[in-house]
Image (tube, rainbow, N blue to C red):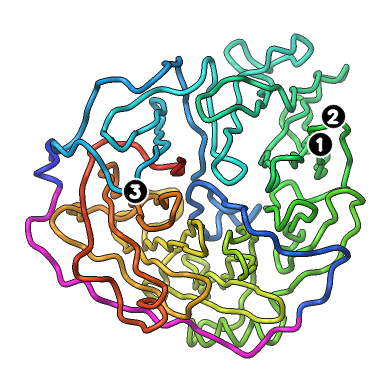
C-alpha cells in the first residue's frame, strides 16, 4: 500500500457513539502543603500506558523527541498529502518522526525549526520550545566514539531562536560515572525546570536517582530528594510536582521549592478502587497509578492519572484514565476491556483518549480516538470515515487546536482533522455532530502539539 488512496478505507462508517464515564462519590484526598491546581499544563505527545518488563514496570512513552535539522525564517513551499492545502483551526502543528521534525502551517506549507537541535517539545502552554542537542561540555565524556555523554537543554521561542541554555550536561566523574538528566519538564508559567538526575557507573549500573528543580530566573538548583530511577512525575501547578512512589502504587505531592512531601493518593483508596471496578468490571483492584498532568480548564482544576491492573498471567492490562478534582474522581475506560489508553490534554478542559490493543512498543494496529471535557461525564467517539480510517492502522497521536475547537489525529502517518463536540453535546451524551470536518495530510510524522 504505497499511495494514500490505498491506505484509506473507501466506505463511510456511522459515527455517533458515546462512552459513559464511571462517576463515583467524592474521594477524600489528603491536603498537601501549598498545593493548588492551576490551569495551563499540557503534557505533550502520547503515553501508551501499560506494564513493561517486570524488572522496571516503566511506562512506555512516545513523546516529543524530535529530530530537528536546520532553520528557515518562514514556511517552505513544499506540500504533501492528498491535495488538501490547508487545515481548520489555524496556527501550526509540530510534527516529528525518526527522520526529523517540522512545523505544519494551516496553509499546508512546512518549515524546519531551530539550528543543531536533535529534539524538542512544546512547553509552557505551547508558548515555548524546550529543545536539546548533544552537549558541548568537553568535561562530559561519552562512553563510545559516536556517543554523546548527555544533551544540553535550551528554552527557545517557537521559531527555535533565541536560544537560552537552561540545563548543561554535567562533567563525567573521575571514576568514569555518567550524570544524566532525564524527563526534563518546564513548569506551568515557565519559571522552573524539573528533571531526574541519574548517576550511572561506567558499565551502566544505576548508582543514584534524585529529583531536581532549577529556578530559571536565578539559576539556583535544588535537590528534592531521592526517587526511583524509573518513576514518572508531572507538574501539578507552578509550585507542586506529583511523582510516582517506588512501588508505583501511590502518588507523592512534592513542594518544588522545599522538597516537602505528602501522599496524594494510593491505589488502595476505597473511592479509586470503586471507580476502577465500576469502569472495568471483573478486573479486580488496581495495582499501579501513574501521573499524567494537569488540565488547562479554567475554573475546573483537575489532575489526570492512569490506573491499571494486570491480567492474571501479566500479558495485558485493565486500564483507565481518571481525573482527580478536589475530593472527587471521574474515571474513563475507553476501548475494550484490555485496551491500552493514551491521554492528550487540550485547552479549555478538552482531552483525547486514544486506544489500542497492540502490545506496548508496537505500532497501534487498531483502535479508536475519543474526545471528552473535564466539565462533562461522557466521551464522544471520533467518527471514522473514508478520510480518517487507514486499513490496518490505529490512532498513534493527537493534538488540539489552540482554541480546542479542532482535533488532529494521526492514523499511522495520515493526519486528519475533526471539529470537537460542544460541551453541551458531550454533557448530553449525544456523540459527535454529523457535520464534522475531516481533511488529511500524508506526512508519516506524528503530531507533538498545536501552537498559535
The magenta stretch spans which residues? 8-28
Residue 287 occupies quadrant: bottom right
What residue did someone put label 1 on? 214
Q: Is residue 424 left or right of residue 344?
A: left
Query: Which of pointers 2 and 3 indicates the residue nearer the eye?
Result: 3
Residue 337 occupies quadrant: bottom left
In the image, residue 442 sits, relative to residue 140, either above or below, namely below
- Quote the CA–CA distance across marks 1 and 2: 6 Å
Q: Nearer the viewer, residue 43 or 141?
A: 43
The answer to which of marks 2 and 3 sits earlier in the sequence is 3
Q: Secondary structure at mark 2?
A: loop
Residue 434 spot, x, y in % from top left: 19, 70
In the image, residue 19 sits, relative to residue 246, either above or below, namely below
Residue lying farthest left?
A: 10
Q: Residue at x 43, y 61 (%)?
A: 352
Label drawn at residue 222: none
Residue 4 spot, x, y in % from top left: 14, 41
Q: Is disc 1 in contact with disc 2, using a CB cutoff of under 8 Å?
A: yes
Reply yes or no: does residue 9 show up in magenta: yes
Q: Residue at x 24, y 66 (%)?
A: 383
Residue 202 spot, x, y in % from top left: 76, 24
What residue did someone put label 3 on? 89
Q: Nearer the viewer, residue 379 or 197?
A: 379
Label drawn at residue 219: 2
Reply yes or no: does residue 327 show up in magenta: no
Q: Residues within 10 Å of mark 3 (few under 14, many from 20)?
A: many
Q: Is disc 2 in contact with disc 3, using a CB cutoff of under 8 Å?
A: no
Q: Secondary structure at mark 1?
A: strand
Amino acid at each position: 500500500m504505497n499511495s494514500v488512496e490505498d491506505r484509506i478505507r473507501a466506505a463511510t462508517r456511522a459515527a455517533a457513539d458515546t462512552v459513559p464515564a464511571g462517576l463515583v462519590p467524592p474521594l477524600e484526598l489528603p491536603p498537601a502543603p501549598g498545593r493548588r491546581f492551576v490551569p495551563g499544563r499540557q503534557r505533550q505527545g502520547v503515553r501508551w500506558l501499560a506494564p513493561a518488563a517486570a524488572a522496571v514496570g516503566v511506562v512506555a512513552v512516545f513523546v516529543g523527541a524530535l529530530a530537528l535539522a536546520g532553520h528557515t525564517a518562514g514556511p517552505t513551499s513544499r506540500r504533501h498529502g492528498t491535495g488538501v492545502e490547508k487545515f481548520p483551526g489555524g496556527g501550526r502543528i509540530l510534527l516529528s518522526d525518526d527522520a526529523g521534525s517540522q512545523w505544519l502551517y494551516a496553509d499546508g506549507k512546512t518549515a524546519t525549526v531551530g539550528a543543531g537541535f536533535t529534539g524538542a517539545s512544546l512547553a509552557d502552554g505551547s508558548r515555548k520550545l524546550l529543545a536539546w542537542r548533544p552537549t558541548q561540555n568537553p568535561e562530559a565524556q561519552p562512553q563510545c566514539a559516536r556517543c554523546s555523554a548527555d544533551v544540553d537543554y535550551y528554552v527557545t521561542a517557537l521559531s527555535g531562536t533565541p536560544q537560552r541554555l537552561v540545563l548543561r550536561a554535567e562533567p563525567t566523574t573521575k571514576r568514569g560515572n555518567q550524570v544524566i538528566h532525564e524527563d526534563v519538564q518546564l513548569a506551568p508559567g515557565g519559571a522552573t525546570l524539573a528533571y531526574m538526575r541519574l548517576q550511572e557507573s561506567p558499565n551502566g549500573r544505576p548508582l543514584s536517582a534524585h529529583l531536581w528543580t532549577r529556578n530559571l530566573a536565578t539559576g539556583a538548583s535544588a535537590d528534592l530528594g531521592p526517587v526511583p530511577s524509573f518513576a514518572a512525575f508531572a507538574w501539578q501547578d507552578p509550585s507542586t510536582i506529583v511523582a510516582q512512589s517506588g512501588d508505583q502504587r501511590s502518588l507523592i505531592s512534592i513542594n518544588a521549592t522545599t522538597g516537602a512531601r505528602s501522599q496524594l493518593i494510593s491505589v488502595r483508596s476505597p473511592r479509586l478502587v470503586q471507580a476502577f471496578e465500576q469502569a472495568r468490571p471483573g478486573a479486580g483492584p488496581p495495582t499501579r497509578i501513574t501521573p499524567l498532568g494537569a488540565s488547562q480548564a479554567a475554573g475546573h482544576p483537575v489532575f489526570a492519572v492512569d490506573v491499571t491492573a494486570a491480567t492474571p498471567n501479566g500479558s495485558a492490562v485493565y486500564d483507565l484514565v481518571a481525573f482527580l478534582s478536589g475530593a472527587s474522581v471521574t474515571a474513563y475506560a475507553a476501548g475494550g476491556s484490555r485496551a491500552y489508553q493514551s491521554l492528550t490534554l487540550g485547552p479549555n478542559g478538552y482531552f483525547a483518549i486514544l486506544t489500542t490493543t497492540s502490545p506496548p512498543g508496537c505500532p497501534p494496529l487498531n483502535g479508536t480516538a475519543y474526545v471528552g471535557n473535564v466539565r462533562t461525564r461522557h466521551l464522544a467517539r471520533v467518527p471514522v470515515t473514508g478520510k480518517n480510517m487507514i486499513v490496518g492502522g490505529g490512532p498513534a497521536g493527537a493534538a488540539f487546536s489552540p482554541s480546542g475547537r479542532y482535533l488532529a489525529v494521526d492514523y499511522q502517518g495520515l493526519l486528519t482533522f475533526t471539529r470537537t463536540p460542544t460541551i453541551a453535546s458531550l454533557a448530553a451524551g449525544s456523540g459527535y455532530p454529523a457535520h464534522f470536518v475531516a481533511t488529511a495530510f500524508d506526512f508519516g510524522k506524528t503530531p507533538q502539539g498545536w501552537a498559535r
